[in-house]
Image (spheres, grey):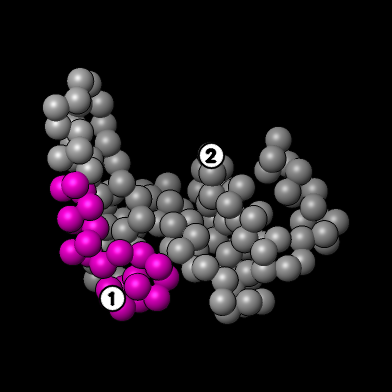
Amino acid sequence: MRRIRVNELLDSNKIKTATDLKNAAMVFQHGNDSSDYGKAVGLMKKAIELDSTTNKWLLAATTDRYLLSKGEAQIYGTQYRKKADEPWKLAEIDTTKISDAERIKYGVETLAEQRQKVKEMNSENQGQEH
């Protein structure tokens, strides 16, 4: 229902500011498929064009989610996965597409920080019943 309403607002030209676009992107970021995630990517790009000070992390996250939904590897490293009794892991990532400097620019941890985060996530889960 939220995505339907946001589409109505987009169609009626009521989403105009960078904040509006970012909020709309957040709705589609939590969508169901690559179509929703792709829309979120486009909305975030427009938000950043309108206001370069917009927090860019959501663009990185929507880009990663979009790529993974199409069966491709993420590039920023914002998406983690956990299957039933298996440990947390960083979802498939292509580490050659962008640099750590670019990750930092988009508010994302470096690859080393991501790997450390996975270790911490898994050590927090030790001793807990599954």
The residue range painted magenta reads 98-120
- Does residue 35 appear in the picture of this structure? no
Name which of mark 2 and mark 1 comes first in the sequence. 2
**Residue 102 located left or right of residue 82:** right
Rendered location of residue 3, percent (x, y): 68, 43
Q: Is residue 61 above or below residue 8?
A: below
Question: Residue farthest to the right?
Answer: 12
Task: Say which quarter of the image contains residue 97.
Answer: bottom left
Task: Say which quarter of the image contains residue 40.
Answer: bottom right
Principal secondary structure, stretch drawn in magenta: helix
Q: Amino acid at mark 1?
A: Ser
Local crowd size for mark 1, using a 10 Å CA cut-off: few (<14), some (14–19), many (≥20)? some
- Depth check: give the residue in front, 48 or 68: 48
Quarter of the figure with the N terminus: top right
Secondary structure at numbered mark 1: loop
Residue on which disc 1 sits:
99
**Residue 81 located left or right of residue 17:** left
Q: Is residue 19 above or below residue 50?
A: above
**Residue 51 located left or right of residue 70:** right
- Does residue 74 appear in the picture of this structure? yes
Q: Is residue 63 above or below residue 97?
A: above
Q: Residue at x 23, y 52 (%)?
A: 117
Residue on which disc 2 sits:
32
Secondary structure at numbered mark 2: loop
Rendered location of residue 36, percent (x, y): 57, 48
Q: Residue at x 56, y 77 (%)?
A: 53
Q: Residue at x 29, y 41 (%)?
A: 81
